Image: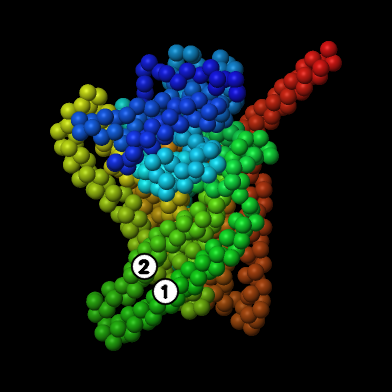
Amino acid sequence: MAESWTFLDTSEPNFRPLVVIELAKGTKEETIAWFTKRIVDKKGNGGAQLLVKPLVTENGDENIYLVGASHLRLLLGAEAVGLVKECNDNSMRAFTYSSRKTFKDFADDNHDFLTMAECQYIIKHELENLRAKDEKMIPGYPQAKLYPGKSIVRRLLTSGILVQIFPLHDREELKKLRHSWYGRVKVGYQPLDEIRSYFGETIALYFGFLEYFTFALVPMAVIGIPYYVFAWEDYDKYVMFATFNLLWSTVILEVWKRICAIMTYRWGTLLMKRQFEEPRPGFRGVLGVNPVTGREEPVYSSIRRQIRIYLVSLPFVCLCLYFSLYVMMIYFDLEQWALDYHEENESNLSNLMLYVPSIIYAVVIEIMNRIYRYAAEFLTSWENHRLESSYQNHLILKVLVFNFLNCFASLFYIAFVLFDMKLLRQSLATLLITSQILNQFAESLLPYWLQKRHKKRMKKRVCSLKTDMDMSLVEQVNLEKEMGTYFGTFDDYLELFLQFGYVSLFSCVYPLAAVFAVLNNITEIYSDALKMCRVYKRPFAEPTANIGVWQLAFETMSVISVVTNCMLIGMSPQVNALFPDSKMDLVLTVALVEHLLLAIKFIMAFVIPDKPRDIQIKLAKLEFESLEALKQQVRVTVKSIVG
């Protein structure tokens, strides 16, 4: 690999812009010259060995640059990041430039061998790994300090010199995707392979999970409607429904693992090696050598990180949890006030007033969740995690703990302290429906409306310019740089996680939760597709083999739902009537049923394989061939030494 970079030609006769870099207006020329030089410099000199071209308009602004790469550079980059492609024998293998002829559809003149999303991912990887060596500061900005190993792009961003980096849309491909995805209302599957090809595996997996989860909710919704209509107050009749719900939650999560394995094997990400993941751009430390890879990278003491986590982050999270409980008690005071008002003034207005505290509390919950999210991101970044996966896991843990308590604490309090099933049913319905309406408005409708207004203004401004460069490209860059930024699937998975909690935790009290969840998710598929294609800038593709820590989060929620549903059924008057003489027998019986259900869940999770048999065989075969190739290489080496 080291020899490959030395002969690489950075010139390209047909420059194809892939990524846009926007610098702050008035950025000093020496800074621009230094940064662009680092981008085009050879790898051996600490550069990225890419291509850069300014986007010049009539007014002379040169703060926007287009980044591309030669075909050869992208192929070598594909090997460096470990992309997996399909071979001529239909197997999936990590791409290597030396064996490029063995891969399906490869040709030296075929520039479509790598998708545009993969090319942009390679460029992003190289830009993020531009690190300072001997520089003490960014040229022209002495206040922007650098030290060996510091990410150059990260320092430019935090210093306000670099405004943003984003990948360009492919207008023709986007138009085709929009038509097949949400261009017409239809009952059918989403074009997940096309979504993956355009947006990458992470986003395609989210939409795959959203679609799968929606279909999986249909049986719960169909069964829940007659239970709601015909057996509202008979909690003993909910035993079968709750039992089905608990087994259902286990089966769908286990089956999803298999579906996920099939998709990611086909996409190649199931085989991608992640154990030598590069340090994240925000990782800070003294430049050192990775003892495993031998590469230069920042080094930071794990002890210092643990101190920050346990002495700062953990107390802060606990303080936020306490504040959330305090707000919850205020909500119950409002509920009591509304109830007293209704008893004194029985009217249509007083009936409506009974729902006002729950609606206000649902809005407050959403506001608190969003404020806490910013604080959690700051704290997790300050903890200075080396890997992006570690950063995401700690961030998700912080946010999940707070959101779980913030959204469900009041329901647990109503169920197991107040023992008010009517209020529990009312609060659950209000929280679920209100949160869905707020999320649809805040995530899709409002951004789409703002983007549409902005697009009209930008088109008028761009048309007034006269440039030598292709007008469509100038227009496209100017429109896309003002679009909103998509910050990943975190909020989307969080919304599904909370929805799963509303459906599973208290299913025996409000069977209609699954119905509202299905209706919401159907609109969510179309609104999320709309915002990805029309509202936000194109996000960089991120290879992934599964939904990560979210799988564990959903499984944990399903275990908690076993406990809550068993306790709710045990509290029902009908079940209590079966044990008139001994409450201890009731408690023991409920505990026994709970343990049996948990045992069934874990047995089912163990029995159902995470990967289908054919995928297991293919993975084992690939591992065997890799070991055989390694043995052959060792034999050749030994033979050459002996000879």
Q: Confirm or deny contact between disc 2 and disc 1 (CB under 8 A).
A: yes
Report the residue marked by disc 1: 327
Mark 2 and mark 1 lie on one chain; the one further toward the N terminus is 1
Quarter occupied by the N terminus: top right
Residue 241: % across, % down: 51, 60
Q: Secondary structure at mark 2?
A: helix
**Residue name at image x 64 percent, y 83 percent:** 581
Residue 601: % across, % down: 63, 55
Dot 1, crowdedness within 10 Å: few (<14), some or many (≥20)? some
**Residue name at image x 23 percent, y 32 percent:** 60
- In front: 9, or 278? 9
Q: Secondary structure at mark 1?
A: helix
Report which quarter residue 34 is drawn in. Answer: top left
Report which quarter residue 346 is drawn in. Answer: bottom left
Outermost residue to the right: 642
- In front: 505, or 437? 437
- In front: 576, or 623? 623
Report the residue marked by disc 2: 364
